Image: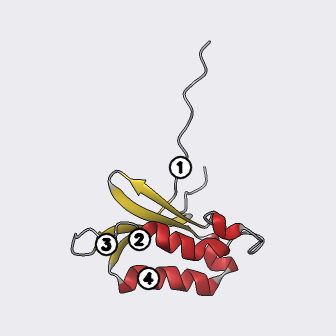
Amino acid sequence: MGSLTARQVFIQGITLDGRTFRPSDWAERLAGVMSQFRPGGARPGSHLGYSPWCVPTTLGSVKCVVVHSDLQAHEPMAWDFVMNFARDNQLQTVEACLVPESSPPASV
């Protein structure tokens, strides 16, 4: 069995000292700025949806941005931008692997 490696970095809307980061829509704003960075590059209309490499979400009651490690390989300056955003705003980050929710088992 192979080892599991983190494929994403979760930027959490909680500062290092435990405060909730504001404004409340920070995750959507950051992901919106990053929407042009996507596999295959920006296309007409791509600003209308989030990049699969940088997606806002909520885990529990905490706003987060999930940043995929592929962004670093394909767009190093964009990766630096988003990681510097987290550092400059003293946001908690964690390397993890987002596991998709499984569908319920089919009834027999």
Question: Is residue 19 or residue 2 the one in the foreground?
Answer: 19
Q: Earlier in the sequence, mark 1 or mark 4?
A: 4
Disc with the residue nearer the chain's start (1 vs 2): 2
Q: Residue 4's spot in the image, x, y percent?
A: 55, 57
User: Residue beneath label 3, please?
Assistant: 22
Q: Residue at x 28, y 74 (%)?
A: 15
* Rendered image: mark on residue 74: none
The three-letter code of the residue at mark 1 reads: Val
Mark 1 and mark 3 lie on one chain; the one further toward the N terminus is: 3
Image coords of residue 108 (percent x, y): 62, 12
Inter-mark Cα distance, 1 to 3: 27 Å
For the residues marked 1 and 4, what is the alpha-carbon distance in whole angstroms?
Answer: 25 Å
Question: Hey, which quadrant is residue 104 in on the image?
Answer: top right
Amino acid type, mark 4: Phe
Label 1: element kind: loop
Query: Which residue position holds label 1?
Result: 99
Q: Amino acid at mark 2?
A: Trp
